[in-house]
Image: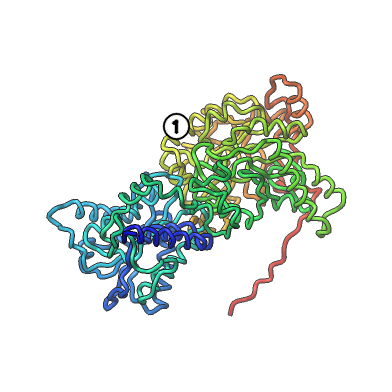
Amino acid sequence: MSSTTTTAAATTTSLTTHLTALAFLSAATVYCFYKSRRLKLSSTPPNLSRKGKLFFISQTGTSRTLAERLFTLLISNDLPFDLADPNTYEPEDLHNETLVLIVASTWEDGNPPSNGVFLSNWLSESAEDFRVGSLLLNKCKFAVFGVGSRAYGDNFDAVGRDLSRRMRSLGALEILPLCEGDVDEGQIDRAFGIWSEDVIRVLKGGEIRGLNGDVSIGENGDELMDGSDYDDDDDDEEDEENGMEADIIDLEDIAGKSLSKKDMGLITSNGKKNGEKVMVTPVIRASLTKQGYKIIGSHSGVKICRWTKSQLRGRGGCYKHSFYGIESHRCMETTPSLACANKCVFCWRHHTNPVGKSWQWKMDDPLMIVNSALEQHKKMIKQMKGVPGVTAERLSEGLLPRHCALSLVGEPIMYPEINSLVDELHKRRISTFLVTNAQFPDKIASLKPITQLYVSVDAATEDSMKAIDRPLFGDFWERFGDSLKALKDKQQRTVYRLTLVKGWNVEDIDAYSSLFSIGNPDFVEIKGVTYCGTSATSKLTMENVPWHADVKAFSEALAEKSHGEYEVACEHVHSCCVLLAKVDKFKINGQWHTWIDYEKFHDLVASGKSFGSNDYMALTPSWAVYGANEGGFDPEQARYKKERNHKSSR
């Protein structure tokens, strides 16, 4: 047997051995392992006689937070480093650096965030300038952790990849293979933690976990002596041509979850199971299950809302109860598509749900989804039995949901059989509220009558929408406008939903009002953003959350801009939520009719005849009207305030 054959066989055996351990690593870390088998790392730790530089290239704060975490770890391990913002650093000084660590995000269209533009451009220009030479950074050793989203296709971690390539082309030695963290998998914190430990281990002269020795096999069985001798892109192309990835389990599907041998055999390199691509990978399932979701089939979910629990206990319902007469304890929150086409900065699931621009997954039957959702919902309701305040009457009512909020998470309108699913709900006389993120105008146009259709209007200008929604579609603004136009053609109740985020989208009142004529909505819901905690994918703080007084002021100003077409109709103080309604349709003889006659709606649907929003409206009770002393709290419910005994600080 030739040495080449022997080496190749050894490599195959090594790779097979490591596959059994892959399930215990995060998606980003596993990817690093796969790439790193081509690298030989120096067994001698870098020279730390002078301080190293730790750069963060960050737009929303994700990479900066991660870098600060690594900086603390480095200092605690007696490794001298400076935490540096490249925006205040002179790139020409790089030739004097001996060790550089970079945590870099990829921003719009694959470009670097604003604080990394100058550094990125300098590296690019230097690498392409023949006068500079390929030894400019030959004294420097470096490592890069890239932060990105695979949903953006070819632009995924474009900045991290470019920095790694440019540094190597200028003679720098990569002491760790480029590690790419995908924020969509909800594993970015864990992936970065493992990478950081590897950084510490290498700087102290140790080895990286998961690597089988120092020598990697290159073309024709030759050993690669260091990371500067190969090019990422060329290797990736060769792997695809040679079919190498066909024998490798999809890393994103197995990351973070130990799989059985059966599962290992079912999941393929393309993220498919039994030949079909599944939306809910094991890592996504684990993350959403931890958050309280009940996963249905391969792409749907249901979750019990805290307001459902609240009204079961007789402690008040949500704003939908105040605005539209929905009984919160008989409301089921579900979605037939956990995927979304946006990556909003205020995402309350911190981007743990999948993303995509079109339906590309195995599709479950709508009847199965509805039946399973009802079954799982009832199981969660039954768990409330015996909870203080839950009466037998309310519990029995809760077991028979009369409303379905298709707004749990993701983009329900992406599901190809959404009309059939809505039909199944209406057959059971379950009303439907559906929320869409205004990126699928054709889906809106083809949607059958539902009780109330929402379009999220998170910003009023193209630039602000790009910043706050972070859409996947390049033509997102055109899609947004077409979605509003499609909404205008609907005969049933329609709503613009505005989520106010202080510091992001509360200044453009004139621009918001200009959108009214495009979609001509029946209602405009204005709600303060909900703070869901800070993570690596969300940098919102309580400072971004408006007070109810702020929401009221914004709503009143917006209503005034409509010149009498809309007025402030209702409010729910507890939710920091206010409702604008069209005066000529829903204010009759001085009284608001924002509530819904649900039985009449179902009769109209069953009749098969054309009908409009005026045909199933009902009188709004006085306690729900804007300015009422109750603030939108149903007086038949019992107010309950938790006693918080905070320890006094000394």
The residue lying furthest to the right in this view is 392
> Which residue is depicted at the point 73% across and 48% down?
376
Q: Is residue 92 above or below residue 367?
A: below
Q: Label 1: how many residues lie within 10 Å, few (<14), some (14-19) or many (20+)?
A: some
Q: Nearer the viewer, residue 156 or 231?
A: 231
Could you tell me residue 325's position as x and y percent? Answer: 74, 39
The residue lying furthest to the left in this view is 131
Could you tell me residue 496's position as x and y percent? Answer: 57, 36
Could you tell me residue 250's position as x and y percent? Answer: 49, 51
Which residue position is annotated with label 1?
Answer: 478
Task: Name the image quarter holding residue 198.
Answer: bottom left
The residue lying furthest to the top in this view is 609
Q: Is residue 50 above or below residue 11?
A: below
Classify residue 26 as left or right of residue 159. Answer: right
Q: Nearer the viewer, residue 479 or 204?
A: 204
Helix, strand or loop under label 1: helix
Classify residue 572 as left or right of residue 480. Answer: right
Could you tell me residue 439's position as x and y percent? Answer: 51, 35
Task: Name the image quarter holding residue 224.
Answer: bottom left
Q: Nearer the viewer, residue 71 or 131?
A: 131
Q: Is residue 44 above or below residue 219?
A: below
Residue 567 appears in the figure = no
Task: Name the quadrant of the N terminus.
Answer: bottom left
Task: Name the image quarter holding residue 79.
Answer: bottom left
- The image's colour scheme reads rainbow
Classify residue 312 as left or right of residue 423. Answer: right
> Which residue is depicted at the point 49% across and 34% down?
480
Q: Nearer the viewer, residue 568 or 222?
A: 222
> Which residue is depicted at the point 50% across and 41% down?
356
Residue 154 appears in the figure = yes
Task: Name the quadrant of the C terminus.
Answer: bottom right
Give the residue type at disc 1: Glu
